[in-house]
């Protein structure tokens, strides 16, 4: 078997796939569910319910607030307790809808049967109809970025899409939610891939899976053996292979130019495997996006698990179901340890992009405080998957030299953390680069508005 990979940079962190073979369990419903109105890239959703309204599972509670936005649906039935704002994990006040949970009554329009629906049975599914259903269901990227899927499936008119790449890489250490989804719902995912191909009128589907998932590779190869439109692409283990540009390079050997270029500019669309499953459910089952697969894991977690969890469920409830936080110092991360965000509180809810909750304990929870000066070893340059010079970006950002940071293409950084991971001086490179990138992007936006 030939294993492909991307050509520039990359690292191989310790794997720690603790929950890899743990069957998914259904998380208990919370007493209250919290729905932030910004669960996606773009404009926040706009509430369409008010305090006191009754909702069912699947009821639309907020609609897309602009061209780049996504609707939000209730994952529970009950009464709207509040439409307002709460302090989120970052310490900032964010708009939210809070629902008191009562029973578990679903919208009658949702098909809850286990029967597999295929395209052959649904001649009405034109590309326009598929995209409309995806938009109505509030589907977004479920690998973390949260880009509204209906927007991604409407590329610029000048773009000629010939392929769809399914991101089933899951290259972050610890996370296994996508893997378990693949093992438990392969047939539905493959129908989702065909729907995506039809939506963009493409003929070539690729599913990229890393070598540490041999069972998933074998399963999908068997199920696509007679299907010439879908190819399973086994990939070497290398981080950050789940990045769009890295995955495109690994699978079809095309390089996406610097921003503002997007994958559509090189003829492809990249969709997370969880999103492909959600597309199947939305289009074939009329089921909005209101639940997802999520791993809760960590070396000292008593009972790490993979969950099927309703969005709006506080992360604290999932941690409690795994035996609670270990004694001593802990860092709770939404996502994986490489690109996830540390939480200030575990009372924040599971959202559309929450693929994992990772608990780092003891020495792993803290940073190495012995920070030294950069001695130009160039390790960060060698591992940067974007071919950048991270030491220059970090230093210029720390010095607030935004012009130099922009000159060295800081906006091309995908914030994967490979530079900081390899730095022998323990410099907080990614922290500085994130600051610089946000400042430079704000300056660029201000210039365009003049």
Image: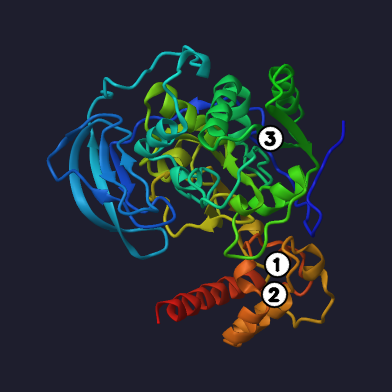
- The secondary element bearing badge 3 is classed as strand
Q: Residue at x 42, y 34 (%)?
A: 128
Horizontal relation, residue 326 to residue 54: left or right: right
Across and down, in percent, residue 295 comes to 55, 38
- The secondary element bearing badge 2 is classed as loop
- The secondary element bearing badge 1 is classed as helix
Locate the C terminus by quadrant: bottom left
- Which quarter of the picture shows residue 449? bottom left
Viewer-side label of 1, 3: 3
Horizontal relation, residue 358 to residue 229: left or right: left
Q: Report how far apart the C-alphas of labels 1 and 3 lie in the structure.
A: 31 Å
Q: Residue at x 36, y 18 (%)?
A: 111
Q: Report how far apart the C-alphas of labels 3 and 2 lie in the structure.
A: 38 Å
Mark 2 and 1 residues: CB-CB less than 8 Å, in contact?
yes
Residue 32 vertical placement versus 46 (above, below): above
Residue 247 vertical placement versus 166 (above, below): below
Q: Tag on residue 206?
A: 3
Label 3 neighbourhood size at 10 Å, few (<14), some (14-19), many (20+)? many
Horizontal relation, residue 343 to residue 264: left or right: left
Q: Tag on residue 427?
A: 2
Locate the N terminus by quadrant: top right
């Amino acid at each position: 078997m030939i294993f492909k990979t991307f050509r520039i940079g990359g690292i191989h962190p310790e794997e720690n796939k603790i929950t890899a073979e743990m069957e998914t369990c259904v998380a208990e419903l919370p007493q209250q569910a919290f729905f932030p109105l910004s669960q996606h890239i773009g404009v926040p959703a706009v509430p369409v319910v008010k305090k006191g309204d009754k909702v069912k599972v699947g009821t639309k509670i907020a609609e897309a607030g602009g061209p780049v936005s996504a609707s939000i649906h209730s994952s529970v039935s009950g009464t709207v307790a509040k439409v307002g704002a709460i302090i989120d994990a970052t310490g900032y006040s964010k708009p939210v809808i809070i629902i008191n949970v009562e029973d578990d009554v679903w919208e009658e329009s949702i098909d809850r049967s286990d029967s597999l629906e295929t395209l052959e049975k649904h001649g009405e599914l034109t590309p326009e109809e598929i995209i409309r259903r995806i938009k109505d269901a509030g589907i977004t990227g479920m690998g973390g970025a949260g880009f509204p899927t209906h927007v991604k499936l409407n590329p610029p008119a000048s773009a000629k899409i010939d392929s769809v790449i399914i991101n089933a890489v899951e290259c972050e250490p610890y996370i296994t939610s996508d893997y378990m989804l693949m093992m438990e719902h392969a047939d539905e995912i493959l129908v989702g891939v065909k729907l995506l191909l039809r939506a963009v009128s493409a003929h070539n589907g690729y599913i990229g899976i890393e070598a540490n998932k041999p069972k998933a590779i074998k399963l999908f190869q068997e199920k696509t053996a007679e299907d010439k439109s879908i190819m399973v692409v086994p990939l070497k283990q290398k981080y950050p292979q789940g990045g769009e540009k890295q995955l495109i390079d690994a699978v079809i050997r095309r390089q996406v130019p610097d921003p503002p270029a997007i994958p559509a500019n090189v003829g492809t669309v990249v969709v997370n495997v969880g999103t492909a499953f959600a597309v199947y459910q939305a289009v074939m089952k009329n089921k909005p996006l209101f639940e997802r697969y999520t791993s809760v894991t960590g070396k000292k977690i008593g009972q790490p698990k993979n969950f099927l969890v309703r969005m709006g469920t506080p992360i604290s409830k999932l941690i409690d179901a795994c035996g609670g936080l270990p004694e001593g110092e802990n860092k709770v991360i939404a996502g994986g340890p490489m690109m996830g965000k540390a939480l200030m509180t575990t009372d924040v809810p599971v959202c559309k992009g929450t693929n994992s909750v990772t608990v780092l304990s003891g020495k792993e929870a803290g940073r190495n405080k012995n920070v030294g000066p950069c001695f130009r070893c160039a390790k960060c340059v060698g591992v940067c998957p974007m071919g950048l010079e991270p030491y220059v970006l970090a230093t210029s950002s720390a010095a607030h030299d935004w012009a130099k940071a922009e000159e060295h293409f800081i906006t091309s950084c995908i914030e994967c953390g490979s530079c900081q991971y390899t730095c022998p001086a323990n410099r907080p490179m990614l922290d500085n680069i994130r600051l610089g990138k946000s400042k430079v992007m704000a300056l660029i936006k201000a210039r365009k508005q003049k």
